[in-house]
């Protein structure tokens, strides 16, 4: 992504099922400095799964 002469990356993982959808963006100093092709998407996908697992816990 390029904005105002600055360039950076913003990895986003998204998921959806029959009635919900979510996207998780990872803003870290390391990720923003990397070229898009060099970002470890598998690592970010694993982190997104952890966010999903936390969000699926019962209320109460």
Image (tube, grey):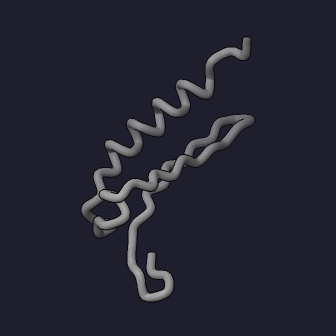
39, above or below 20, in the image = below
> Viewer-proximal residue, 30 or 57?
30
Position of residue 24 measured from the top left corner of the image (x, y, whole percent): 54, 47
Drawn side of residue 40 relative to residue 48, left or right = left
Q: Is residue 6 left or right of residue 34?
A: right
Considering every residue shown, the one lying at the far left of the view is 38
> Residue visible at 74% across and 35% down?
19
Quarter-wise, where is residue 47 in the image?
top left
The quadrant of the image that shows the C terminus is: top right
**Residue placed most toward the observer, 33 or 37:** 33
Depicted 7 relative to depicted 51: above or below:
below
Residue displayed at 40% across by 66% down: 9
Q: Tell me where residue 28 appears, x and y as whole percent.
A: 39, 54
Q: Residue furthest top?
A: 60
Q: Nearer the viewer, residue 45 or 7?
A: 7
Residue 57: x, y in percent?
62, 18
Report the label total: 0
Tell whether 22 sits left or right of 59: left
Q: Is residue 59 left or right of residue 37?
A: right
- Residue 29 higher or lower than 1, as above or below: above
Up/down of 2 relative to 48, above or below: below
Residue depicted at x 39% and y 71%: 8
Front one among 33 and 57? 33
Query: Image quarter for residue 59?
Result: top right
Q: Residue at (41%, 42%) from the top-left corner?
A: 45
Q: Residue furthest bottom?
A: 5
Measuring from the top left, give residue 21's x and y in whole percent.
66, 42
Indicate the quadrant containing the N terminus: top left, top right, bottom left or bottom right: bottom left
């Amino acid at each position: 992504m390029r904005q105002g002469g600055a360039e950076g990356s913003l990895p986003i993982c998204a998921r959806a099922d029959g009635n919900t959808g979510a996207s998780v963006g990872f803003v870290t100093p390391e990720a923003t400095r990397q070229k898009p092709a060099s970002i470890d998407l598998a690592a970010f996908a694993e982190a997104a799964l952890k966010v999903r697992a936390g969000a699926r816990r019962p209320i109460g």
